[in-house]
Protein backbone atom coordinates (compact mmCIF):
# COMPACT_ATOMS: atom_id res chain seq x y z
CA UNK A 1 0.00 0.00 0.00
CA UNK A 2 1.04 3.59 -0.50
CA UNK A 3 2.44 5.70 2.34
CA UNK A 4 3.55 9.29 2.52
CA UNK A 5 5.99 10.60 5.10
CA UNK A 6 6.79 14.14 6.10
CA UNK A 7 9.32 15.45 8.58
CA UNK A 8 9.72 17.13 10.84
CA UNK A 9 6.23 17.21 12.34
CA UNK A 10 6.80 20.56 14.02
CA UNK A 11 9.49 23.19 13.59
CA UNK A 12 10.24 26.53 15.19
CA UNK A 13 12.74 28.65 13.29
CA UNK A 14 13.93 32.27 13.63
CA UNK A 15 13.38 34.82 10.89
CA UNK A 16 16.19 34.71 8.34
CA UNK A 17 17.12 31.10 8.98
CA UNK A 18 17.05 28.43 6.25
CA UNK A 19 14.37 25.78 5.88
CA UNK A 20 14.26 22.25 4.56
CA UNK A 21 11.14 20.09 4.73
CA UNK A 22 11.18 16.62 3.28
CA UNK A 23 8.45 14.42 1.89
CA UNK A 24 8.79 10.86 0.68
CA UNK A 25 6.25 8.52 -0.86
CA UNK A 26 6.31 4.73 -0.75
CA UNK A 27 4.41 2.17 -2.75
CA UNK A 28 3.88 4.07 -5.98
CA UNK A 29 5.92 5.11 -8.99
CA UNK A 30 6.06 8.38 -10.87
CA UNK A 31 3.46 10.15 -8.74
CA UNK A 32 2.56 13.80 -9.08
CA UNK A 33 3.79 15.52 -5.94
CA UNK A 34 2.50 18.70 -4.32
CA UNK A 35 3.43 21.14 -1.56
CA UNK A 36 0.57 23.04 0.04
CA UNK A 37 0.53 25.65 2.78
CA UNK A 38 -2.33 26.34 5.14
CA UNK A 39 -1.93 29.65 6.97
CA UNK A 40 -3.93 30.29 10.13
CA UNK A 41 -7.59 30.91 9.27
CA UNK A 42 -7.05 30.40 5.55
CA UNK A 43 -7.60 27.64 3.04
CA UNK A 44 -5.00 25.40 1.51
CA UNK A 45 -2.77 27.09 -1.03
CA UNK A 46 -0.82 25.18 -3.65
CA UNK A 47 2.85 26.19 -3.60
CA UNK A 48 4.56 23.75 -5.95
CA UNK A 49 3.76 20.66 -7.94
CA UNK A 50 5.94 18.20 -9.76
CA UNK A 51 5.13 15.69 -12.48
CA UNK A 52 8.58 14.10 -12.48
CA UNK A 53 12.19 14.26 -11.32
CA UNK A 54 13.57 17.80 -11.57
CA UNK A 55 10.24 19.00 -13.02
CA UNK A 56 8.85 21.62 -10.67
CA UNK A 57 6.15 24.20 -11.26
CA UNK A 58 5.56 27.11 -8.93
CA UNK A 59 2.07 28.38 -8.39
CA UNK A 60 2.79 31.34 -6.14
CA UNK A 61 5.91 33.56 -6.26
CA UNK A 62 7.60 33.56 -2.88
CA UNK A 63 10.89 33.01 -1.12
CA UNK A 64 10.37 29.25 -1.08
CA UNK A 65 11.71 26.71 -3.56
CA UNK A 66 11.13 23.03 -4.19
CA UNK A 67 13.23 20.21 -5.56
CA UNK A 68 12.59 16.63 -6.57
CA UNK A 69 15.96 14.84 -6.68
CA UNK A 70 14.37 11.38 -6.77
CA UNK A 71 11.07 10.03 -8.07
CA UNK A 72 9.48 9.74 -4.64
CA UNK A 73 11.23 12.56 -2.78
CA UNK A 74 10.01 16.15 -2.68
CA UNK A 75 11.82 18.86 -0.73
CA UNK A 76 10.63 22.33 0.22
CA UNK A 77 13.34 24.87 1.01
CA UNK A 78 14.00 28.46 1.84
CA UNK A 79 17.27 30.35 2.19
CA UNK A 80 15.78 32.96 4.55
CA UNK A 81 12.49 32.49 6.34
CA UNK A 82 9.99 35.30 6.78
CA UNK A 83 7.39 35.64 9.52
CA UNK A 84 4.72 35.16 6.85
CA UNK A 85 6.11 31.69 6.11
CA UNK A 86 4.55 30.37 9.30
CA UNK A 87 1.84 27.82 8.65
CA UNK A 88 0.99 24.18 8.19
CA UNK A 89 2.79 22.59 5.23
CA UNK A 90 1.29 19.55 3.58
CA UNK A 91 2.80 17.27 1.00
CA UNK A 92 0.47 15.28 -1.23
CA UNK A 93 0.72 12.81 -4.07
CA UNK A 94 -1.62 11.70 -6.79
CA UNK A 95 -1.78 9.33 -9.71
CA UNK A 96 -4.47 9.28 -12.37
CA UNK A 97 -7.38 6.96 -11.78
CA UNK A 98 -8.83 4.76 -14.50
CA UNK A 99 -11.30 7.54 -15.24
CA UNK A 100 -8.54 10.09 -15.73
CA UNK A 101 -9.22 11.96 -12.50
CA UNK A 102 -6.57 12.48 -9.81
CA UNK A 103 -7.27 11.29 -6.31
CA UNK A 104 -4.96 13.13 -3.89
CA UNK A 105 -3.42 11.68 -0.75
CA UNK A 106 -2.01 13.94 1.92
CA UNK A 107 0.90 13.54 4.30
CA UNK A 108 0.67 14.27 8.04
CA UNK A 109 1.97 17.81 7.64
CA UNK A 110 4.65 20.00 9.22
CA UNK A 111 3.67 22.86 11.50
CA UNK A 112 6.20 25.67 11.00
CA UNK A 113 6.41 28.64 13.33
CA UNK A 114 8.76 31.44 12.35
CA UNK A 115 9.69 33.63 15.30
CA UNK B 1 -14.58 36.44 -4.83
CA UNK B 2 -13.18 33.01 -4.06
CA UNK B 3 -13.58 30.40 -6.77
CA UNK B 4 -14.74 27.86 -4.17
CA UNK B 5 -17.14 28.95 -1.44
CA UNK B 6 -18.27 26.79 1.43
CA UNK B 7 -21.12 27.29 3.85
CA UNK B 8 -21.49 27.42 6.72
CA UNK B 9 -18.01 28.38 7.97
CA UNK B 10 -18.77 26.93 11.38
CA UNK B 11 -21.38 24.39 12.39
CA UNK B 12 -22.30 23.01 15.80
CA UNK B 13 -24.63 20.04 16.01
CA UNK B 14 -25.94 17.62 18.60
CA UNK B 15 -25.03 13.99 18.32
CA UNK B 16 -27.45 12.19 16.02
CA UNK B 17 -28.36 15.20 13.91
CA UNK B 18 -28.33 15.19 10.11
CA UNK B 19 -25.67 17.59 8.82
CA UNK B 20 -25.29 19.30 5.46
CA UNK B 21 -22.26 21.25 4.28
CA UNK B 22 -22.45 23.13 1.00
CA UNK B 23 -19.88 23.98 -1.64
CA UNK B 24 -20.34 26.31 -4.61
CA UNK B 25 -17.74 26.96 -7.28
CA UNK B 26 -17.47 29.35 -10.18
CA UNK B 27 -15.21 27.52 -12.65
CA UNK B 28 -15.76 24.57 -14.95
CA UNK B 29 -14.44 21.48 -13.28
CA UNK B 30 -13.48 17.92 -14.07
CA UNK B 31 -13.76 16.69 -10.48
CA UNK B 32 -14.69 17.80 -6.98
CA UNK B 33 -13.14 16.50 -3.77
CA UNK B 34 -14.37 16.44 -0.20
CA UNK B 35 -11.60 16.27 2.39
CA UNK B 36 -11.62 15.91 6.16
CA UNK B 37 -8.99 17.61 8.31
CA UNK B 38 -8.71 16.50 11.92
CA UNK B 39 -7.58 18.81 14.75
CA UNK B 40 -4.02 17.49 14.47
CA UNK B 41 -3.91 18.70 10.87
CA UNK B 42 -3.91 15.43 8.96
CA UNK B 43 -6.11 15.40 5.86
CA UNK B 44 -8.07 12.45 4.57
CA UNK B 45 -9.78 12.30 1.21
CA UNK B 46 -13.45 11.40 1.65
CA UNK B 47 -14.85 11.58 -1.86
CA UNK B 48 -13.88 12.45 -5.40
CA UNK B 49 -16.84 12.90 -7.72
CA UNK B 50 -17.67 14.39 -11.08
CA UNK B 51 -21.39 13.65 -11.25
CA UNK B 52 -24.30 12.30 -9.25
CA UNK B 53 -23.87 10.95 -5.79
CA UNK B 54 -21.51 8.81 -3.73
CA UNK B 55 -22.07 7.17 -0.36
CA UNK B 56 -19.61 5.81 2.16
CA UNK B 57 -20.98 4.72 5.49
CA UNK B 58 -22.80 7.68 7.04
CA UNK B 59 -21.36 10.12 4.54
CA UNK B 60 -23.07 11.11 1.30
CA UNK B 61 -21.73 13.51 -1.31
CA UNK B 62 -23.75 14.93 -4.17
CA UNK B 63 -22.87 17.20 -7.04
CA UNK B 64 -24.90 19.21 -9.53
CA UNK B 65 -22.59 20.17 -12.37
CA UNK B 66 -25.10 22.51 -14.03
CA UNK B 67 -25.59 24.48 -10.81
CA UNK B 68 -21.90 24.25 -9.84
CA UNK B 69 -22.83 23.03 -6.40
CA UNK B 70 -22.01 20.10 -4.16
CA UNK B 71 -23.20 19.00 -0.74
CA UNK B 72 -21.73 16.74 1.89
CA UNK B 73 -24.23 15.08 4.21
CA UNK B 74 -23.53 13.27 7.45
CA UNK B 75 -26.30 11.11 8.84
CA UNK B 76 -26.54 10.22 12.54
CA UNK B 77 -23.63 12.55 13.39
CA UNK B 78 -21.19 11.57 16.12
CA UNK B 79 -18.62 13.55 18.12
CA UNK B 80 -15.85 11.77 16.21
CA UNK B 81 -17.14 13.50 13.06
CA UNK B 82 -15.87 16.80 14.52
CA UNK B 83 -13.34 18.13 12.03
CA UNK B 84 -12.87 20.68 9.27
CA UNK B 85 -14.46 19.60 5.99
CA UNK B 86 -12.85 21.02 2.88
CA UNK B 87 -14.24 21.18 -0.64
CA UNK B 88 -11.75 21.31 -3.51
CA UNK B 89 -12.23 21.39 -7.28
CA UNK B 90 -10.02 20.49 -10.22
CA UNK B 91 -10.63 23.04 -12.99
CA UNK B 92 -10.91 22.03 -16.64
CA UNK B 93 -7.61 22.56 -18.38
CA UNK B 94 -5.78 22.88 -15.10
CA UNK B 95 -2.45 21.25 -14.46
CA UNK B 96 -2.51 17.58 -13.61
CA UNK B 97 -4.28 17.05 -10.33
CA UNK B 98 -4.09 20.67 -9.21
CA UNK B 99 -6.92 21.67 -6.93
CA UNK B 100 -8.56 24.88 -5.79
CA UNK B 101 -9.65 24.68 -2.17
CA UNK B 102 -12.46 26.20 -0.16
CA UNK B 103 -11.66 27.59 3.26
CA UNK B 104 -13.36 24.73 5.01
CA UNK B 105 -16.31 24.20 7.32
CA UNK B 106 -15.51 23.57 10.95
CA UNK B 107 -17.94 21.02 12.37
CA UNK B 108 -18.34 20.37 16.06
CA UNK B 109 -20.67 17.58 17.16
CA UNK B 110 -21.64 17.69 20.82
CA UNK B 111 -22.53 14.52 22.76
Image: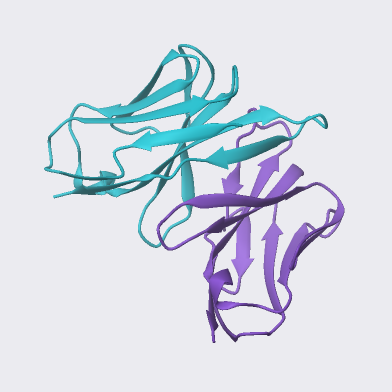
Question: Observer-nearest residue: B17 or A13?
Answer: B17
Residue B40: x %, y % from top left: 40, 58
Quarter of the picture containing the N terminus of chain A is: top right
Question: Observer-nearest residue: A57 or A3?
Answer: A3
Residue B13: x %, y % from top left: 59, 84
Number of callouts:
0
Task: Report the residue at 60% width, 35% height from top.
Answer: B98
The colour applied to the residues of chain A in this rendering is: cyan
Residue B27 visible within the image = no
Left/right placement of residue A85 relative to residue B3 reads: left
Left/right placement of residue B37 relative to residue B3 reads: left
| Residue, far front | A1
Left/right placement of residue A71 relative to residue A64 reads: right
Tell me which colouring the rendered structure shows: by chain
Asked which quadrant contains residue A9, the reply is: top left
Asked which quadrant contains residue B21, the reply is: bottom right
Residue A10: x %, y % from top left: 26, 46
Question: Observer-nearest residue: B65 or A54?
Answer: A54
Q: Which chain is represented by purple in the image?
A: B
Residue B23: x %, y % from top left: 68, 63
- In the depicted structure, whether residue A47 falls above or below residue B78: above
- In the depicted structure, whether residue B91 falls above or below residue B18: above
Residue B108 visible within the image = yes
Task: Report the residue at 43% width, 21% height from top.
Answer: A73
Asked which quadrant contains residue B64, the reply is: bottom right
Amino acid sequence: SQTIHQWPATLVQPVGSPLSLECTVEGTSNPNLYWYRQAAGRGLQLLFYSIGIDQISSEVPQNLSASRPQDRQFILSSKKLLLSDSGFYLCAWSVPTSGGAYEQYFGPGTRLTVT
Amino acid sequence: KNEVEQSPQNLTAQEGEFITINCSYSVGISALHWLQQHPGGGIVSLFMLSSGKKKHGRLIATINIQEKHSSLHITASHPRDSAVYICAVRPYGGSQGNLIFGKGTKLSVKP
